[in-house]
């Protein structure tokens, strides 16, 4: 069932235009769609999107003494959706989450993405993970790193972000992690990063201190604006 939905979704590209690229399409004219009635996430006016990807991964949490989970970072694989018709971005995000949710624990995000390649070879843009904050030396900072995947050979094709805006997910704040706007503080991959259309990733509302750390599967769109390298 899922496979056939993917077949329709991704093979429509091939049908529409046999020569259409499946990755690396120009997204500079793509329009970021943000919820109205909020001021936290603002579409950049001076830079254009350079990459649009779907991230497939996990959000990690530890049970704090207060009995609630606190974030200890995340790790995700990003694959390129630049050549997909923008009207399909949200459906694609949802479909990938449906697939990732039911995937056996033994399958990595990369393997699930590779399964999509049975239909149409998706291209990995890069990885998203957390590092020690490079400015202050304490705490965690999110990093998007394309140097081992789509931008091999460009040693500055990474960006470390600092959160600049945060709204609860308009889809479902209980299950879906917040939508974010981040400013690049290191690296040349992007000046700003948006995490939107999140699916999953939220921890249970309470926990028993001393219980093991948990990982919660999530999928989201990542829009990277204004890279130069
Ligand atoms: C998240 O947890 C998984 C185990 O579920 C672990 O393999 C991974 O290294 C952790 N990543 C981060 C960034 O904490």
Image: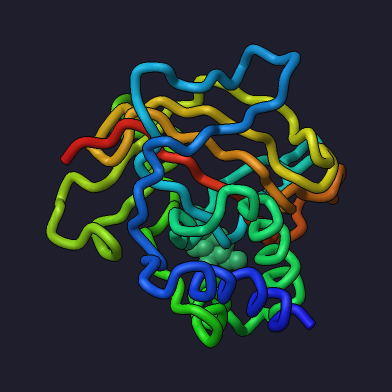
Task: Report the side of 155 relative to 205 (left or right).
Answer: left
The image shows residue 152 at horizontal and vertical percentages of: 19, 62
The image shows residue 60 at horizontal and vertical percentages of: 62, 53
The image shows residue 44 at horizontal and vertical percentages of: 44, 21
The image shows residue 202 at horizontal and vertical percentages of: 75, 47
Q: How is the image coloured?
A: rainbow
Q: Based on the displayed image, in which of its 4 quarters is residue 153 positioned? A: bottom left
| Position of the C terminus by quadrant | top left
Rendered-image quarter of ligand 1: bottom right
Q: Based on the displayed image, in which of its 4 quarters is residue 168 positioned? A: top right
Work out whether 160 lies above or below 10.
above
| Position of the N terminus by quadrant | bottom right
Work out whether 22 lies above or below 179.
below
Total marks in image? 0
Depth check: 142 or 49 in front? 49
Which residue: 44% across, 54% down? 82
């Amino acid at each position: 069932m899922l496979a056939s939905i993917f077949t329709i979704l991704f093979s429509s590209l091939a049908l529409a235009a046999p020569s259409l690229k499946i990755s690396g399409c120009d997204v500079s004219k793509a329009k970021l769609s943000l919820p109205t009635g909020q001021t936290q996430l603002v579409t950049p006016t001076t830079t254009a999107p350079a990459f649009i990807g779907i991230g497939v991964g996990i959000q990690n949490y530890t049970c704090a003494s207060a009995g609630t989970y606190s974030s200890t970072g995340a790790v995700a694989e990003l694959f390129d959706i630049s050549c997909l018709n923008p009207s399909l971005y949200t459906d694609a995000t949802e479909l990938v989450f449906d697939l990732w949710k039911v995937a056996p624990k033994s399958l990595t995000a990369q393997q699930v993405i590779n399964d999509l390649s049975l239909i149409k070879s998706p291209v990995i843009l890069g990885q998203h993970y957390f590092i020690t904050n490079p400015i202050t030396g304490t705490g965690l900072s999110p990093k998007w790193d394309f140097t081992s995947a789509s931008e091999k050979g460009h040693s500055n094709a990474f960006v470390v972000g600092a959160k600049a805006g945060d709204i609860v997910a308009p889809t479902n704040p209980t299950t879906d992690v917040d939508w974010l706007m981040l400013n690049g503080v290191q690296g040349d991959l992007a000046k700003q990063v948006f995490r939107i259309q999140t699916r999953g990733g939220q921890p249970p509302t309470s926990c028993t201190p001393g219980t093991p750390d948990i990982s919660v599967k999530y999928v989201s769109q990542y829009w990277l604006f204004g890279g130069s390298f």
